[in-house]
Image: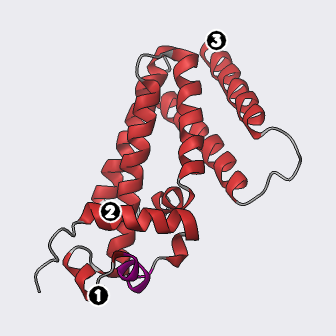
Amino acid sequence: MSPRRGLDIEIILEAATEMADQEGLEAITLATLAKKLNIKPPSLYNHVEGLPGLRKKLAIYGLEQLLEELTKSAVGRSGDDAVRALAISYVSFSRKHPGLYEATLMAPDEDVDHQKAASAIVDLIVNVLRAYELEGEQSLHVVRGLRSILHGFSSLEQKGGFGLPLDLDKSLHLLINTFLAGVHQLVQD
């Protein structure tokens, strides 16, 4: 069976992203996606290896989109300004694309394509952190810390975990400034 004219993986991933963001990642099945694309479900098998293949491609697509946003935010900045921009961009991405963001967390670690896409994000953040002249593994520990903060904040926000009527952006800025104060202390020690 040949692929439908005009249907390609980009169109499929854009439709899946829209569904994930609006209805949640679990709402995506091959049947619901095919219906959205106005095609028969078997047509998707010309582009993805079933639902697991779709989820893998969606995870990689999400990581690539996140990398693009983070890169744009860091261009022309350095030091604290770059870290703040990255942090805001990361949380903004998770707000704009909650389902796609969730998909980025679901691909298996042993998948080479997923590892490559995830490594590109780590490399970008390591490059931004070079301004602090961190030594060896220290840089990777700091990257892990920043990711943990940003993922934790994003996840809690998405799940409604911040019940108090306080400005979330103000909380995010305070959190990032506290993180940066810690990085500066680490560099001094």
Q: Position of residue 59 (x, y in %)?
A: 40, 60
Depth check, front residue: 82 or 100: 100
Q: Which residue is mark 1?
A: 40
Verify whether residue 32 appears in magenta: yes
Q: SS of the residue at dot 2?
A: loop
| Magenta residues, start to end | 29-36
Please name the residue shown 47% across and 28% down the image: 73
**Cα gap from disc 3 to disc 1, whole angstroms:** 61 Å
Q: Position of residue 170 (x, y in %)?
A: 77, 32
> Which quadrant holds the N terminus?
bottom left
Q: Which kind of residue does numbered mark 1 sit on?
A: Lys
Q: Which residue is mark 3?
A: 188
Q: Is disc 3 in contact with disc 1, using a CB cutoff of under 8 Å?
A: no
Few, some or many residues within 10 Å of mark 3 (<14, 14–19, 20+): few
**Cα gap from disc 1 to disc 2, whole angstroms:** 28 Å
Is 155 above or below relative to 86? below
**Residue farthest top in this picture:** 188
Q: Is residue 181 left or right of residue 167?
A: left
Q: Position of residue 114 (x, y in %)?
A: 34, 57
Q: Which residue is mark 2?
A: 111
Is 63 above or below relative to 77? below
The answer to which image quadrant residue 141 occupies is top right
Q: SS of the residue at dot 3?
A: helix
